[in-house]
Amino acid sequence: MQKTKYYSWNSGKLPKGCQLCVKGEKLVLFITGLCPRNCFYCPISDQKYKKDVIYADEWPIKKEKEVIEEAKLIGAKGAGITGGDPFSVINRTVKYIKLLKKTFGKKFHIHLYTSLDLINDKKLNKLYKAGLDEIRIHPEIYNDKLWNKIKLIKKYNWDVGVEIPSIPNAKRQTEELINYFKDYIDFLNINELEFSDNKTQKLGTFVPKDRFSYGVKGSEEFAKHLLKNYEKEIKNIHYCTAKLKDRVQLGNRLKRRAKNIATKFDRITKEGTLIRNVIYTKNLKKTKKLLKDLIQGKDLIEDKDRLIISRQILNKYKESLKKLKLKLAIIEEYPTYDRMPVEVEFI
């Protein structure tokens, strides 16, 4: 057992999907919020939970080409298909696997997360023929009725893993699960149990490990216990922390996207956020006309409902811009589709 440079712990090697993920090279394709299960620890947001929606990272998808565009913007070398349960919309899942493979080539690595509830040989065969590289199952910890479906999955030549949360008060059930699956899998991923701000998660009996973390107290200790106990029986085990997901996985993906979308007037921070000088407007055409004599066109960049300008222009013309009753701001925001703000300073 060893600590990784990604704030996690492992024995053996990371699965291919995780190797790309920690570098920010995996597109997160949320294929649907539909799922037959109601896990008390489910972290999915209220806007996605049990809703048949598609997201590519933070981008709500309406057209197939948007998924491809997002993959290009982060320089993706693979995709992780998640939900909900992708088996709930198997034809859609297969369609996007084929689309990604056709666009980026066979080496574009695709892994998929699923429960065992909806698995059957027909669906597995469709996924295999589409080119799925790696399948990760979330077996129900408190119910072993479907565990034998792992035998269906092992009929195909892809990497197979089990991914489970580290639940501190479920030691017996978790060990029973691992003992059942250990001879069928290529890797075991153990995730730190963490709090989320949705309405469906039921973690009332647990408390945070400290005031700075979403991680549950006792989850890390139990995960390390499992890793130590099974490292000689399972070749590859990885304990993935909440810190890895937030600081490494998300952070690296943000930096990759920031480099691809930053304008000549933006400054990229070391965290991957963008600092921008903007003019907010409800009418871009009218605003540009107002500024025609004041600022040359080359000093303006359109960005949806606003204009991005240089700091030099902002400083030089801010009083004149205010007289035109324009709203000016220096903002720090994520380089994501939703442009989530970190800080806004109105001028």
Image: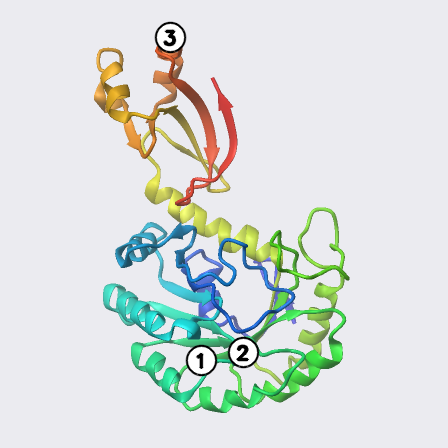
Q: Position of residue 267 (x, y in %)?
A: 41, 32
Give left or right: position of 198 versus 69.
right
User: Which structural element holds mark 1?
Assistant: strand
Marks 3 and 1 in Cβ contact (< 8 Å): no
Tell me the number on the disc at residue 323. Answer: 3
Tell me the number on the disc at residue 187. Answer: 2
Quadrant, the N terminus: bottom right
Crowding at label 2, few (<14), some or many (≥20) Cα neighbours within 10 Å?
many
Crowding at label 1, few (<14), some or many (≥20) Cα neighbours within 10 Å?
some
Q: Identify residue type, mark 3.
A: Lys
Residue 102, by quadrant, is bottom left
Q: CA distance from mark 3 to mark 2?
A: 63 Å
User: Which structural element holds mark 2?
Assistant: strand
The residue drawn where x is 64% and y is 79% is 231
Give left or right: position of 51 versus 206.
left
Q: Is residue 291 visible?
A: no
Q: Identify residue type, mark 2.
A: Phe
Q: Earlier in the sequence, mark 2 or mark 1?
A: 1
The residue drawn where x is 36% and y is 76% is 132
Q: Is residue 235 visible?
A: yes
Crowding at label 3, few (<14), some or many (≥20) Cα neighbours within 10 Å?
few
Q: Nearer the viewer, mark 3 or mark 1?
A: 3
Marks 2 and 1 in Cβ contact (< 8 Å): yes
Q: Position of residue 46 (x, y in %)?
A: 54, 54
Q: Is residue 183 above or below residue 344?
A: below
Residue that mark 1 sits on = 159
Q: Name the foreground residue: 205 vs 248.
A: 205
Q: Position of residue 133 (x, y in %)?
A: 38, 76
Q: Nearer the viewer, mark 3 or mark 2?
A: 3
Q: CA distance from mark 3 to mark 1?
A: 63 Å
The residue drawn where x is 26% and y is 56% is 65
Q: Is residue 227 above or below residue 334?
A: below
